[in-house]
Image (cartoon, rainbow, N blue to C red):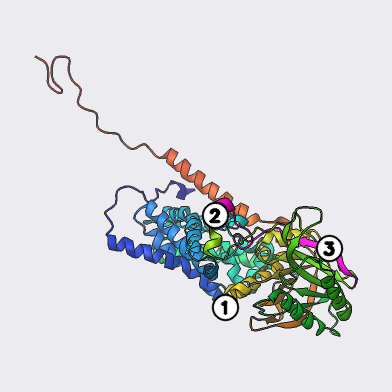
């Protein structure tokens, strides 16, 4: 491969950069890194995602050294993390800056990578390689920060395309990871077209080839076929605050559920933390829920956020999806497995416990479940796979539920702490991606909005229940069978990106080995046996 022998821009001595210019670049980097946040809900400028990274890429490629490129990658990463998580600032306060600074370090190697491929005057081969390698580097960052302990997969760039039908079809084949790769490849190609005139023709050809490949994937990826329908109701009580809010929220959910009588739902879904006591310790609440099930003619899927004692397993606070039928709890229960860092537990509490005095971090760690659960409704009907709040951001969790036989994905959520931010809209949009990836409908039910339902292709069904108040609604939901490409093959785009990075690293190493060694210092003139150097002896 010819580009492997191209010598990247070196990190050797460069003319001094004026302090003012360094300061301007240091300010520009986080601003440029924050721009992609506009592509997500609520701004929802999905088309902007395809050019949002261009200013940041252009800035990094002109960095005077690889070290400076890494710094500007880090600063841009800080800006990106603050922008896509800005709604957490009221809860975490100054600790949000600490987290952004730490997680922003993931972009430092990416900054160096961008400059090594696009810095200076790269050859056409190196510019073309950048269109594959730079997105692969970004996807590796998304993979690393998707680990629950680092905050989870919130703000994955591909998630900005949640309402774009062609992107959802790509997600059915390679999950949100494949969509992120496409978005990054377009950003990188546009950067090359702007900054590397000699590579415009081959890059234009590469863009056409990429568009044809995407079209082929869309055509090949089978659309889910409808196999039936089910009626699912969402009960959203709205904002309930002040003393006794837990009990009053239950009362409001009970009132709204009664309004569903005669509307023939197959399942009624309440949001996260809709029940504030263990139903085994509060048989009065269990009976009230059973009476509701009898009244509306359907089971209820509620979410219990309470301390559990006296049962097998550890004592502590769990968040659990619990199915309640006309005779009471059916015994089907799913305990949330992936918890929100600081919101539901404090990592390394002995070291970071001080965060509870700075913001609204969890005062006590919640306990986690140990397995996914697929539930059978008491009177037949579709099998449901529950997820709790944060878990709807993880593609692998919904995939696991579908492989285990779930016909409908149900995410029970609560974003009332972030009611006036972008978080409710953005969280609800994730269900569209999970539906498209798995080929199964997805229900996103919240306490205070936004609640929404998406079909097996990721398209929204009916209207949303917004953050303006409480409501109950019934949705006619199509069911589907068959396995999507993502359900069959899993996270293959991630493995492909890692392979691209490995191949690029190997080509650089091989090029260095083939490069002739630099000439050493000139040898001093030889001395004769009888005199000084270069002078005959007497």
SS of the residue at dot 3?
strand
Residue under label 2, please give it. Answer: 352
- Determine the residue located farthest toward the left in the rendered image: 538
437 or 499, which lies in front? 437
For this view, does 448 lie left or right of residue 98?
A: right
Q: Nearer the viewer, mark 1 or mark 2?
A: 2
Sequence-first disc among 3 and 1: 3
Residue 312 — which label? none
534 or 352, which lies in front? 352
Residue under label 1, please give it. Answer: 420
Sequence-first disc among 3 and 2: 3
Q: Residue at x 71, y 58 (%)?
A: 337
As measured in the structure, the alpha-carbon distance from the residue carrying label 1 to the one carrying label 2 is 28 Å
Residue under label 3, please give it. Answer: 332
Is the C terminus in the top left, top right, bottom left or bottom right quadrant? top left
Q: Position of residue 87 (x, y in %)?
A: 54, 71
Q: Position of residue 166 (x, y in %)?
A: 64, 71
Which picture quadrant has residue 40? Answer: bottom right
Q: Nearer the viewer, mark 3 or mark 2?
A: 2
Tell me if residue 388 can be seen: yes
Badge 1 local density, few (<14 within 10 Å), some, or many (20+)? few
The boundaries of the magenta stretch are 326-353
312 or 425, which lies in front? 312
For this view, does 472 lie left or right of residue 3?
A: right
Badge 3 local density, few (<14 within 10 Å), some, or many (20+)? some
Residue 483 magenta-drawn? Answer: no
């Amino acid at each position: 491969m010819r580009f492997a022998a191209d010598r990247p821009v070196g990190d050797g001595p460069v003319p001094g950069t004026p302090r003012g210019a360094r300061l301007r670049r240091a300010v520009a980097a986080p601003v440029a890194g924050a721009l992609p946040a506009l592509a997500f809900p609520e701004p929802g400028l999905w088309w902007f995602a395809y050019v949002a990274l261009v200013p940041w890429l252009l800035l990094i490629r002109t960095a005077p050294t690889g070290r400076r490129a890494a710094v500007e990658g880090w600063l841009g990463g800080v800006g990106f993390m603050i922008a896509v998580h800005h709604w957490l600032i009221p809860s975490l306060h100054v600790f949000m800056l600490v987290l952004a600074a730490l997680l922003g370090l993931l972009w430092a190697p990416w900054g160096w990578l961008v400059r090594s491929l696009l810095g200076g005057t790269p050859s056409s081969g190196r510019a073309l390689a950048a269109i594959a390698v730079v997105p692969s580097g970004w996807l590796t960052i998304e993979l690393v920060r998707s680990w629950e302990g680092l905050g989870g997969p919130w703000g994955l760039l591909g998630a900005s395309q949640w309402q774009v039908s062609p992107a959802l079809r790509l997600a059915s084949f390679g999950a949100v990871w494949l969509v992120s790769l496409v978005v990054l490849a377009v950003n990188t190609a546009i950067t090359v077209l702007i900054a590397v005139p000699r590579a415009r023709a081959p890059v234009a050809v590469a863009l056409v080839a990429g568009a044809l490949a995407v079209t082929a994937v869309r055509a090949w990826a089978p659309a889910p076929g409808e196999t039936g329908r089910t009626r699912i109701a969402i009960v959203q009580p709205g904002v309930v605050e002040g003393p006794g809010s837990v009990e009053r929220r239950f009362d409001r959910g009970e009132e709204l559920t009664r309004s569903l009588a005669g509307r023939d739902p197959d399942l009624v879904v309440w949001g996260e933390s809709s029940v504030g006591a263990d139903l085994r310790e509060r048989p009065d609440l269990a009976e009230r829920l059973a009476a509701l099930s009898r009244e509306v003619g359907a089971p209820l899927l509620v979410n219990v956020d309470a301390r559990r004692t006296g049962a097998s397993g550890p004592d502590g606070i769990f968040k659990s999806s619990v199915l309640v039928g006309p005779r009471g709890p059916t015994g089907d229960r799913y305990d949330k497995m992936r918890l929100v860092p600081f919101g539901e537990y404090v990592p390394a509490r002995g070291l970071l416990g001080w965060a509870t005095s700075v913001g609204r971090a969890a005062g006590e760690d919640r306990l986690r479940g140990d397995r996914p659960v697929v539930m059978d409704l008491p009177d037949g009907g579709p099998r449901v796979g529950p997820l709790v709040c944060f878990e709807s951001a993880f593609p692998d969790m919904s995939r696991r539920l579908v492989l285990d036989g779930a016909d409908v994905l149900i995410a029970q959520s609560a974003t009332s702490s972030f009611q006036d931010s972008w978080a409710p809209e953005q969280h609800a949009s994730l269900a569209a991606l999970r539906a498209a990836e798995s080929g199964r409908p997805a229900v996103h039910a919240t306490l205070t909005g936004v609640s929404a339902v998406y079909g097996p292709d990721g398209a929204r069904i009916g209207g949303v229940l917004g953050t303006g108040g409480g409501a109950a609604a019934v949705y006619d939901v199509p069911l589907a069978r068959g396995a999507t490409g993502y359900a069959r093959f899993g996270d293959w785009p991630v493995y492909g990106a890692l392979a691209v990075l490995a191949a690029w690293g190997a080509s650089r190493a091989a090029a260095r080995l083939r490069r002739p060694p630099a000439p050493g210092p000139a040898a001093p003139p030889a001395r004769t046996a009888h005199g000084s150097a270069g002078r005959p002896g007497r």
